[in-house]
Image: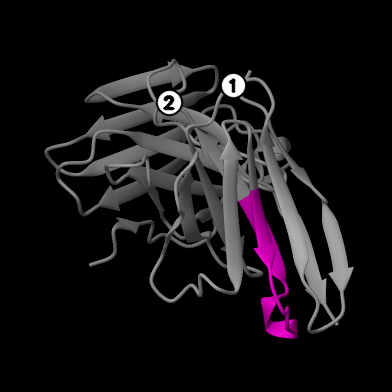
Amino acid sequence: GAVVSQHPSWVICKSGTSVKIECRSLDFQATTMFWYRQFPKQSLMLMATSNEGSKATYEQGVEKDKFLINHASLTLSTLTVTSAHPEDSSFYICSASSHGTSVSYEQYFGPGTRLTVT
Amino acid sequence: QKEVEQNSGPLSVPEGAIASLNCTYSDRGSQSFFWYRQYSGKSPELIMSIYSNGDKEDGRFTAQLNKASQYVSLLIRDSQPSDSATYLCAVNMGGNNRLAFGKGNQVVVIP
């Protein structure tokens, strides 16, 4: 149980273009989804928290107009990196959590998306 | 003070030995504590969760929690080469299930 998928697993895009990353909870309803970024040899950095049907809450220093998050259903959240630049190249990982169930408070991570901007 | 601290450097243990990892946290009101394992180039995988003071055992893993000391640890018994990874301590910071992560401890099990 508690499986989270992410698509694509890797993507290469040109500077200035936009990239959309999907995160799906496959076997549970995720009331909350989280988006993280991880640079090489560094720990996870939380970018934003999203609740189904609500606007995402962004961490300090994360540009909400650059990293667009949509959480339209209890099983799907998307992160769109707009006008990507080489410095946006990173490992983007989503996680999902559910309230009031046996997996309450636990976050389950997707496999991650490795973004390279050329 | 950082929310979650894992201060020890890379840990090398011989195969079959016990690996011990420590973590402290700053928010006295935290109620949920987790250990994640992350292999190089992969995403974190939940291996233990603990909510009450004391020990919790799951296979070769034992998590220990002491809320009074704001301290949580992970023991890996009979360490195997496949345990070589970075172990992340995570603490729930309340509201929206947000987790604060430590920087992680790298464990290397030497055959």
Horizontal arrangement in the rendering, residue B10 relative to residue B99 (left or right): right
In the rendered image, residue A83 lying in the magenta stretch gets the answer yes
- Tell me where residue A15 appears, x and y as whole percent: 81, 84
Is mark 2 in CB contact (under 8 Å) with mark 1? no
Judge depth for marks 2 and 1 and give the one in front.
1
| Label ID, residue A28 | 1
B20, above or below B59, in the image? below
Quickly name the residue at label 2: B62
Is the residue B14 above or below the residue A39 in the image?
A: above
Q: Is residue A76 left or right of residue B95?
A: right
Callouts 2 and 1 on one subunit: no
User: Which of B68 and B16 lies nearest the eye of the viewer?
Assistant: B68
Q: Amino acid at mark 1?
A: Phe
Residue B101 within the segment the image draws in magenta:
no
Front residue (pair B100, A80): A80
Residue at image position (39%, 31%) is A105
Q: Disc 2: which chain?
A: B
Q: Position of residue B15 (x, y in %)?
A: 66, 36
Badge 1 marks a residue whose secondary structure is loop
Decide: few, some or many residues near mark 1? Use Cα within 10 Å; few <14, some 14-19, many ≥20.
some
Front-most of A46 and B30?
A: A46
The residue lying at 59 percent from left, 21 percent from top is: A28
Q: How many marks?
A: 2
Percent position of residue B82, x then y: 72, 37
Is residue B41 in sight in this rendering? no
Q: Which residues are magenta?
A: A78-93
